[in-house]
Each structure stands twice: as structure tokens, then as C-alpha cells.
Amino acid sequence: MTVSATKKMTFEEFLQFDDGTDTLYELENGELIPMPSESELNCRIAMFLVAYFLTPR
């Protein structure tokens, strides 16, 4: 059995972290978790809200 010991990332290290990609990450318990891209439904809701608030009332 092999146990991998990895160092937990601090918040300060997280703020300075840049892996050279456009991937966004969350920091949870010292571990980086890649965030998924936006869903199609989320994009549609966002565009609806933009159009709604740009419409003169």
C-alpha cells in the first residue's frame, strides 16, 4: 500500500496560484478543485436577465 503525502495549499498560495490556463479553481480544505464551465441553462438565464434589465420600463 502506497500513501501519497501532499502539502495542503494555503489561502495565500491559492491567491498567487497560476497554472497558465483559463481553468478556474476552488480551494477546499487546502486542495484545488477545478470548477466546471457554465451550463447552457445558466447562460440562457443570464442572457434573459440582461435583456430584461436593459428593456426600458
Image (cartoon, rainbow, N blue to C red):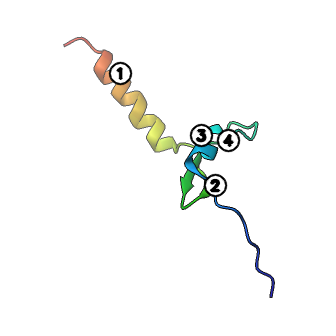
Could you give the CA–CA distance between mark 3 and mark 4, rounded to whole angstroms?
A: 6 Å
Q: Give me the residue at 45% from left, 43% from top.
A: 41
Q: Give me the residue at 63% from left, 54% from top.
A: 9
Q: Are marks 3 and 1 in contact (CB under 8 Å)?
A: no
Could you give the CA–CA distance between mark 1 and mark 4, rounded to whole angstroms?
A: 36 Å
Q: Is residue 18 above or below residue 55?
A: below
Q: Give me the residue at 37% from left, 29% from top.
A: 48
Instruction: Name the residue beneath numbered marker 4.
Output: 17
Residue type of the residue flagged with mark 2:
Met
Residue type of the residue flagged with mark 3:
Leu
Q: Are marks 3 and 4 in contact (CB under 8 Å)?
A: yes
Instruction: Name the residue beneath numbered marker 2.
Output: 9
Residue at far left of view: 57
Q: Nearer the viewer, residue 50 or 21?
A: 21
Q: In this view, does 28 lie above or below 54?
A: below
Q: Tag 1's secondary structure?
A: helix
Residue 18 locus on image (x, y percent): 70, 38
Residue type of the residue flagged with mark 4:
Phe
Residue 47 locus on image (x, y percent): 42, 28
Q: Tag 3's secondary structure?
A: helix
Residue 56 locus on image (x, y percent): 24, 11
Instruction: Name the residue beneath numbered marker 3.
Output: 15
- Position of the C terminus, as image quadrant, is top left
Instruction: Name the residue beneath numbered marker 1.
Output: 51
Q: Tag 2's secondary structure?
A: loop
Could you give the CA–CA distance between mark 3 and mark 1, rounded to whole angstroms?
A: 34 Å
| Image depth: mark 3 or mark 1 in front | 3
